[in-house]
Image: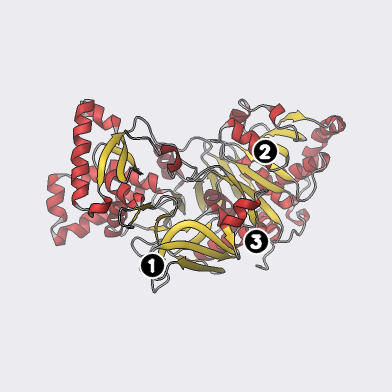
Amino acid sequence: MMNINYVKEYIEKSIKENWDQPAFTDYKGKTFLYQDVAQQIHKHHKIFELWGIKKGDKISLIGRNNSNWAIVYLAAISYGAVIVPILADFANNDIHHIVNHSDSVMLFVGDSVWDNLEENSMPHLKAIFSIDTSSLLVNRDSKVGHKYQEFLKTIKNDIKKLSPQTIFYPEIPNSKLGVISYTSGTTGFSKGVMLSLNSLVANVDFGRKNIGLKPKDKLVSFLPLAHAYGCAFEFLMPFSVGCHITFLTRVPSPKIILQAFQEIKPKLVLAVPLIIEKIYKKQILPIINKPTMKVLINVPILNKAIYQKINAKLTDAFGGNFLEIVIGGAPINKEVEEFLRKIRFKYTVGYGMTECGPLISYIGWEKIKAGSCGVLLPGLQIKIDSSNPESEAGEILIKGENVMEGYYKNEEATKKTLIDGWLHTGDLGIIDNDGFIFIKGRSKSMILGPSGQNIYPEELEARFNNLPFVTESLIIEKNNRLIALVYPDLDAADEAKMKSADIERIMEHHRVDVNKNLPQYSQITKIKLYPEEFEKTPKKSIKRFLYQISEN
C-alpha cells in the first residue's frame, strides 16, 4: 500500500497551498478558486451530517461535467463516503438500477437528467439534490426539513470564516473503498467496479511524477468525469497539483472542443482516438492527398519542411501549448499513428481499464514505440497468457496497487475476473524485450479463423475506417464468413451527389481493395451498409454484442 494519505495529501494540501488560485471554471461561466471549493466542500459535509450520512455510505452523482459535479465528488471522498459516479448518457432504467444496486442513500443529479427520472423508482434515497442549482429536490426525512432551512441561513457566514489554517479533513485509510464505478463495456451489462482510495493514489501519484504538470497550468475537461480515464487525469490528478481545470459543461463535439483549446491553450490534452482520427480525416488527409502535395512529400529535401508545417497546424488546433496528447480508451488507427510519427507530433498512447482506476501502461511521447501503449506502471505486475509472450498474443493479466477490489455485490463476476489476485483484462496482447505492451484486440471480440487462425476485427476495421465515404465499420463473423457492417459518410455522399447504388458500388470496390492485402482466412466476403452510427460505450468502443446479425 502506498503511504500517501489520499484525502490529506491530494485534497486538503492542494486546497491549502493554492487557496487564492483558480481551481475550476465552467466553460463560458463561473470560476471557483481553491478557497471556494473548500467552502463548498464544508457546506456539503454539513449536509451529509444533517441527513445522517456515515463513513462508508454510498452517494450517487450524475450529470454533465461541471464544477459542482467535481465539488460533490471531492466532498464525498473527503468525508469518508463512497462516491458512485454515473454516466449521464445511461438510460433512465439503468440509472434507477445503479442507484438502487449501489445502496446509495443520497443522489446529486443534473437538472436535464432529473427531468426524466422517477423518484419513486429509487425508494432508499434519503435526499436528492440538484447539481446545477444546489437546491433540495426530494427530502424523505421529515426531521431534517426544518433544520435544513435553518442551516441555509447560517452556512454562508460559517463558510466565510474558513482559511487555509482551518481546513482539516479526516485521515481516511487508503485501504477504504472510495469509488464504485459502473461501466458499460463492449461485452454486456454494467458492473460496479470497487476502487479503493489506494487505486486513486496510485494513478494520481503516477501522473504527478510522470506527466509534468505544475500549479496554475490550465486544462480542459471534456471526457466524461464519471469514467475513470477523464476523472483521474482531467480532474483528480490536476487538482492535486494545483491546476486550473475548465469543464466543457456540454456535449463535447470536436468543433466545441477545438474552440475551447484555442481559447484556453491547455497544458495537457487527453483524447480518445475518435477525435484524433476525425481531425486527421477532415483536416489533414485533404491536404496531403492533393496531387502536387503528393509529389512534394516524396522529395526528401522538401518533405521535412512540409511535415513541420503540418505538425505546426495540428499542434495549433489543440491550442499549441501542450506537453503532449495522451490517447487512450481504444486503439488508434495504424495509418493515423504512422502519420503522426512521421511529422513528430507530440502524442503518446496509454492503456488502462476502469478495473485499474484506470492506468496500466504509459510512457512519454518521445519514447513511445509505434503500435505500443507504453510500458507497465510501477507497482504493477503483468503476465501474458501465452507460451511465447513476445510473439504470440495472449490475455493480459495484471496484479498490483491499481487493481479493483472486485465488482460490488457480484461475486460470480468477480471470481471470473480476479483469479489468484490476477486481473483478467479480457484484452489480448504481447510484450517485447523492452517491456512495451502491444494490444492485439479484445479476447471476446477475437474471431477464430477456419483453420484456428486468430482474426482481430479491430485491425480489419482500421483498414476500412480511413477509406473515402466510410464513417466507421464493424467486422462480424457469421457462418464462417466475415461481414463488414459499414456506416457510410452520408454528408460526403450528399456533397458528391451520390445515390445508394453509387455508395454500394464504392463499398464493393473498397472490399476488393482491402482483401488484396489480407490473407485468405481474414478476407471480407460481404459489406452490409448500416443506416446509423454504431452504439458505443463511454470509451467510444462499439458495443459489439449488439450487432450479431442474422444473415440469410
**Dot label at residue 99:** 2
Q: At 16% across and 49% down in the image, what residue appears? A: 293
Residue that extends furthest to the bottom in the rendered view of this protein: 433
| 484 relative to 412 in the view: left or right | left
In the rendering, at what x and y percent does residue 202 appear?
Answer: 59, 62
In the picture of the structure, the residue carrying the numbered disc 3 is: 198
Please say if 49 is above or below 422: above
Q: Secondary structure at mark 3?
A: helix
Between the C-alphas of marks 1 and 2, the distance is 43 Å
Mark 3 neighbour density, 10 Å: few (under 14) some (14–19) many (20 or more)? many
In the rendering, at what x and y percent does residue 25 appear?
Answer: 57, 42
The mark that comes first in sequence, 3 or 1, is 3
- Residue 66 occupies which quadrant of the picture? top right
Q: Quadrant of the N terminus?
A: bottom right
Visible in this render: residue 253? no
Please say if 120 is above or below 49: above
In the picture of the structure, the residue carrying the numbered disc 1 is: 367
In the rendering, at what x and y percent does residue 172 appear?
Answer: 74, 58
In the rendering, at what x and y percent does residue 310 appear?
Answer: 27, 51
Visible in this render: residue 46? yes
